[in-house]
Amino acid sequence: MIPISGSRSSALTRWLRTLDADRLRRILETRPDAVRAPEPATLGELADRLQRPGSVALVIPRLPLPCLQAAEALAALRPPVHPARLEQLLEADGAAVEVALSMLAEHALAWPGASGELHMAAALREAWQTPLGLGPGLEELLAAKTSEELRQIASALGLPPVTRKQDRLQAVLKHHGDPGLLGKLIASAPPRARELLEQHTGEEPPVLLMSGAPAPDSARRWLLDRALLVGHEWAYQPARVPAEVTRALRGPGWHAPFTPGPPEPKLVRLMAAEVDREAAAAATAFAGQAAALLAECAAHPPAALKSGGIGTRELARMGKAVQCEEPVVRMVLESAYAAGLLAYEGRALLVTAAYDAWAGQEPADQYPVLLQAWWELGCTPSGSRDDENKAVPAVGRTPPCAGCLAARQGLLTALADLPEGYGVRDPADLGDRIAWQRPFADELPQDATPFAGLIREAELLGVLGRGALSSLGAALTSDDPAMLRDRAAGLLPTATGTVRLGADLTAVVTGQPTAGLAALLDALADRETRSAASVWRFSTASLRRALDAGRTADGMRTDLSAVTDGPLPQPLGYLITDAARRHGQVRVAPAACVLHSDDTALLGEITAHRALSALGLRRLAPTVLLCRLPLPETLDALRAAGYAPAAETDDGTVRLERPERPRATPRPLPRPRRTATRPQRRPPELAVRLLAAPDRAPHPDPEQGIPFQTDTEEILAGWAKALTLTDIRQLAHAIHEKEPLTIEYVASSGNHTIRTLSALRFDPPLLYAYCHLREDERVFSLSRIHAVMPA
């Protein structure tokens, strides 16, 4: 578990004070969680927030490989250290190392001191238990040794005798710090002792060697006596190999890994128009498929599995219905669910009221909603298999995956870094660049090549075209909704509002039909194909369905004439007239049930029909038949036999059979309504204010004229003794503004947990809140809250 808070340092505060407003602004933009309300009042409070382990943990997945390599090497050197030592360890060009250090400084993870030495955030240094596989240094391991033990080590090394403990320690450190002397010592080791050390020449974390109680063997004792292995001779505890010894064992040519530049794929020259042309085709196809899939969800809501999510059978049914591949179905469902167009209602995934407004928009307005939702998804939606090759349901409402989000960001960053006017010859080559941009990114278990599923998603969405970043992708990374809408409007065609009616009873729409046109044709005909041109076919059954829904022959002619340029084809007019003439000639009344008609010959025909013998028809009058089956079954039987009956209500009027349109109501999180707060300052304004703010004492002290800002802060400070002033301010703000908050909590059992809370209610010494981990109301002791952070 990564803690969300930890120890602080004033070194970062002093460095922040040396920055100008522009450099401080860039730090505030790269670390937005550090400036969440309430805004930091001083640079000291900002530094306090920037060094929280939870805050640092949010930044690490966004760093490219050279930054992480430089940070790990810096952690191995135990800062503060001079930059020359880092360059020597990396054996890299100083300019390349400077670029990595500049990016670390821009994220306030590493920074130069007053004398040029390099410092780094404690939380980042602790991210590696044994950076570069070196383990702790000799000085750290010898710190617990007594003066007599140090004298014995110095004597075994043949060093001149000294009397003070500190002098003995420095003599040993100086000896082991000389690669030549240390190399000679290792070369003189007995074969068995050398064999014990050889297992540490790799770059994996060093193995812990047991000290061998009750008595160590001669080889281990030889190592312990000369501080090549540091431990205790007569104890059951592990002994460690100092970092200096491990480096010497790896040889003089060893250096820490450093990859300053990304892999270079084969490039091809491209015109921007070529990229956008392919992106427009992909985006248009995806927008049309998304509209069709969500319309299918509205008509036939997919059923969820008992374990949650939409299973492969339902995905296959929907894909067949709208003629698209399973990855597209998954992408649309996940994106629409994230955008609030779909929601679970019981065991069904239903469209919401927001879908109705979305369905009536133009493709250029529909597409950005789904694209933005995909960009922010906490998963890779096309993933259909897990690590055990088992099917993964869609819309499973699983916890967000930071690695999947990092992979998506890494892909667009890798595309943006390509030379202008060029694209990769093979999109599969982008996988290695993604891994370089985001080393912590997650791949799909089903990927044949690195990040193949993610790259395919970008192609289907039109973000990637011809191996280059499209204008849609560029707008997506700009975080500007207006720009994304404009780019989509420039690439996606407008919806088609006209249809071409054929004499073969077909209706053809080129491009994506408007919501009104699609609804009209779906009501009057059966859709046969979906592609660049969609085709519907009129039939007696489809027109009968429309008549059952309350449409009339004249109304259908009028509606179709309004969406076509020419007159209605004669065969279609005849079909509408014939369907309307036959419709309702037989009326089925509920009783269980009664059939009546003015056409006595037709009733006689129905009575004698062998296929209808199961109805048990009996003539009560020349125009009335009694049926022993309920009305729905009678209607189905008559229609199956080729008749066109109309159902009646209890008062004798014709019952309209309109299809139901179920809508889900998204269940809101149990959090209170947010109250209005003053708008947050933009990073430039906040940077100027922080640089102008005087430094304050770390803790309020009313006796010294440094009061708390609110009574809540003062009360919290009396009960939450484990919290710093920064944490107290944020907790008080969350209570006042009724905002969610993440806390580090130590239960009475001693277990440390991270909880996200909302609906906070303050009643010292307790805090009542809804716990999102337990999905229930919980009570927390203020004294057991050890750190807080914005949710």
Image: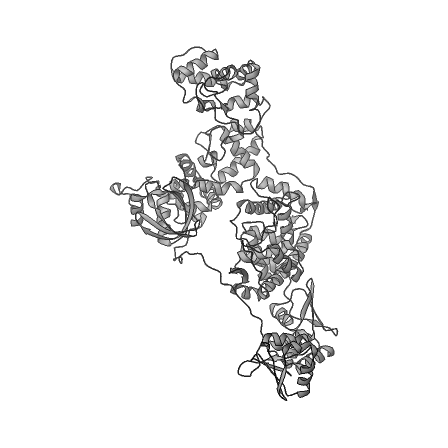
Q: Residue furthest left?
A: 703
Q: Position of residue 198 (x, y in %)?
A: 57, 21
Q: Position of residue 678 (x, y in %)?
A: 39, 55
Q: Is residue 272 above or below residue 89?
A: below
Give the quarter of the image for residue 677: bottom left
Q: Is residue 134 above or below residue 445?
A: above
Taking the image as drawn, is residue 81 in sight?
A: yes
Q: Residue furthest bottom?
A: 622
- Residue drawn at 55 percent across, 68 percent down: 661
Q: Is residue 47 above or below residue 544?
A: above
Looking at the image, which is closer to me, 665 or 684? Answer: 665
Looking at the image, which is closer to me, 596 or 293? Answer: 596
Q: Position of residue 175 (x, y in %)?
A: 49, 16
Taking the image as drawn, is residue 710 in sight?
A: no
- Residue drawn at 49 percent across, 38 percent down: 105
Q: Is residue 174 left or right of residue 322?
A: left
Looking at the image, which is closer to me, 188 or 710? Answer: 188
Q: Is residue 242 above or below residue 528?
A: above
